[in-house]
Image (cartoon, helix red, strand yellow):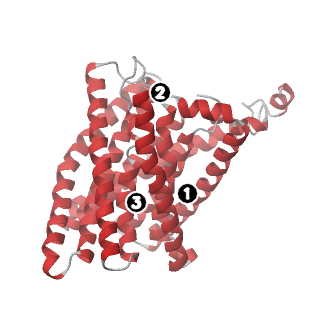
Amino acid sequence: MTTFRTATSHGLLRDLDSPGSVIEHITPNWFASVMGTGIVATAAATLPVQNVVLHMAAVVMWLLASTVLVVVSTLFAAHWLAHRRVALAHAAHPVMMQFYGAPPMALLTVGAGTSLLGADILGQSLATSIFVVLWTAGTALGLATSVVVPYVMITRRSADTVALPAWLMPVVPPMVSASTGALLLPHIADGQWRLAMLVGCYALFGSALVTGLMVTTAVLGRLLHGAVLPVQAAPTIWITLGVIGQSVTAANLLGADAAMVFTGDRSEVAVVLRAAGILFGMVMGGFGAMMFALATALTVHAARRGLRFSLAWWSFTFPVGTCVTGAAALGRALESSVVEALAVVLFAVLVTAWTTVATRTVREAYRGRVFLPA
């Protein structure tokens, strides 16, 4: 081990004792890098302003997210096979277990990108088939984490347990399933199957929304009445924006798709659902603006106290991306150029955040530092 460090003291993985150490601490929060990269692609594809350059950039980001998904999944599987005891310890850790919500959301995000952008490379039929597989797997895993993780927390609760933004990670995946499921609706046969899919997506929306708002309330209560978040955990406050942005996205996409299901004598139902999505988006958008400002202020506060880079920085990406897709969907429903312009501004923030975090991640991965235990 000493020989390896000496030989690589100025090169690749120089902070590790051996190359095998790369997989020793591959935790589920690595999948946040897939989420953060994939949301750049899907956000770009849904912007109100489109051109060839933006489309090509979105395709490149989708391909990158797909590649990262394969790499991280392979390393994560190798970690479980080679370091099962460490993996079980991570799964039992009260904070790390929350990030088991990241793998299903990674699958769903890449799946959405495949639906929106994959046809250029794979063809429409294959892209849709891959999307169906990823959506099904991501939804099944997300439903599992939304039940299993809270169950473990309830049955193994310790006296000093406090609410954390990371608690949102295992309960938000059904909301991602709802918003991405809206992209799947047009590919389902008209009739009862499409109706069942729409109803199922609204059910997923409801389960994640209610639970997510409960957790967000608990987190805000902790911040107001308890101690401030540890400096290194400060970026996770941005996770609260994920349920807000994703819910606005889902409400408006599902409201728009309702017209495919409720026709003729039932068309009024589609009008009501579309209007409900718009109303929800406007109300939740105000809450999102407040949380965006609060998260920014808390991040600046943490930066002044010595915030260092960690994988938690990926919390700056996916939640902002959901705000982009939410603003784009709401702007489209309202036919509001102001809201659509907001989506473009938020996209610029997202790209800046992703570039910063991705660059730091690559640099720290080259050194080997991000593969060390937190």
Q: Horizontal and vertical percent for residue 284? A: 21, 49
Asked if the residue under mark 3 is in contact with the one under mark 2, i.e. CB atoms within 8 Å, the reply is no
Few, some or many residues within 10 Å of mark 2 (<14, 14–19, 20+): some
Q: Is residue 328 left or right of residue 113?
A: left
**Secondary structure under the numbered disc 1 in the rendered image:** helix
Q: Identify the image quadrant of residue 166.
A: top left
Question: Disc number at residue 19?
Answer: none
The amino acid beneath tag 2 is Gln
Question: Disc number at residue 65?
Answer: 1
- According to the picture, the residue beneath numbered tag 2 turns out to be 232
In this rendering, the answer to whether 36 lies above or below 360 is below
Question: Disc number at residue 43?
Answer: 3
Quote the CA–CA distance across marks 2 and 3.
27 Å
**Residue 299 in view (yes/no):** yes
The amino acid beneath tag 3 is Ala
Q: How many marks?
A: 3
Q: Is residue 42 left or right of residue 93?
A: left
Q: Horizontal and vertical percent for residue 224? A: 26, 23
Q: Which residue occupies 29% across, 30% down? A: 218
Q: Horizontal and vertical percent for residue 147? A: 41, 43
The amino acid beneath tag 1 is Ala
Outermost residue to the right: 3
Quote the CA–CA distance across marks 2 and 1.
25 Å
**The N terminus appears in which quarter of the rendering?**
top right
**Between 67 and 127, which is closer to the camera in this rendering?**
127
Q: Identify the image quadrant of residue 44.
A: bottom left
**Sequence order check: which comes first, mark 2 or mark 3?**
3
**Secondary structure under the numbered disc 3 in the rendered image:** helix
